Image (cartoon, helix red, strand yellow):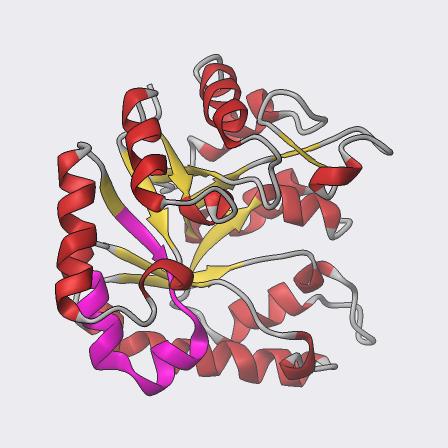
Amino acid sequence: MTTLGFQLYSARNFPPLSDTLKKLSQAGYTEVEGYGGIYGSLDEPALQALRSDLDANGLTMPTGHFGLDLLENQPAQAMTIARTLGIEAIYCPHLAPDQRPTDASGWCAFGQRLGEVGKRYQDAGYVFGWHNHDFEFKTLADGSTPQEQIFAGGPDLAWEADIAWVIRGGADPMAWIESYGKRIKAVHVKDIAPAGENVDEDGWADVGHGTVDWKALMAALRQTPAKHFVLEHDNPKDVDRLIARSAAAFDTY
């Protein structure tokens, strides 16, 4: 059976983190994914305390999101975070709108930039890659997409495929899995509510309670090198509900 992890960003509005870790452990989760908001500015003792909290709850953090600024400008700090928390795969998760290129060559250059940043982490033994949103799937003037250009510029980049964002970007996730499946080392598992529903949750849904065909997707994704499947909901109003219902649904896929 494939293990479902939990992106801790999903619980950012339900502090304290220590309570979330206990809830996840009690619900049977064994993996979590970190993000900059919980470790980006921590000193080593605080990181050690977080690691102890993970250990006490029987949780590991094999994957983590790291902002591009930290990765580029504070590599020693990024390495300390990853080493202390036991992170094996580092994913750059986002690019602010005012920093996004506007044409194919610009996105290819961004892919090259990511590739250069990633080399030091790959050389240190980490998986390094990109986590998508929806903007990477909007067609550019030349007919290509930013995601294609990122991959062209960064041929060694892994991909943490956020399937629901692929769909929201207007793309066919099955086609992308077929074309770029060899790059997929991790997957974000989340669901999209039917049109007009869950407006107070930004249109997202608990896994298994939306419109994404996760049973078919998991059959395809299991043919890729993906090792980690990470539950995410960008704005849940009830994190206990999210944790329980999503795990129950995922167990059927």
176 or 131: nearer the viewer: 131
74 or 27: nearer the viewer: 27
Up the image or down, 93 lies above or below 239; here it is: below
- Give the percent coordinates (x, y) of residue 224: 42, 39
Residue 5 appears in the picture as rendered: yes
- Give the percent coordinates (x, y) of residue 130: 47, 63
Q: Give the residue displayed 22% in from the left and 36% down from the top.
A: 59
Up the image or down, 194 lies above or below 13; here it is: above
Number of marks in the image?
0
Q: Give the residue displayed 75% in from the left and 39% down from the top.
A: 200
- Give the percent coordinates (x, y) of residue 175: 65, 43
Q: Give the residue displayed 26% in from the left and 31% down from the top.
A: 30
Quadrant for residue 212, please give it.
Answer: top right
Up the image or down, 241 lies above or below 74; here it is: above
The quarter in which the N terminus is drawn is: top left
Seen in the image, is 107 located left or right of residue 183?
right
Q: Residue furthest right?
A: 196
Up the image or down, 61 lies above or below 174; here it is: below
Residue range corresponding to the magenta coloring: 62-83
Q: Give the residue displayed 57% in from the left and 36% down from the top.
A: 190
Quadrant for residue 133, please give it.
Answer: bottom right
Residue 86 appears in the picture as rendered: no
- Give the percent coordinates (x, y) of residue 153: 51, 77
Give the dominant element type of the magenta stretch: helix, strand or loop. Answer: helix
Would residue 244 be counted in the magenta stretch?
A: no
Seen in the image, is 153 located left or right of residue 19?
right
Would residue 71 be counted in the magenta stretch?
A: yes
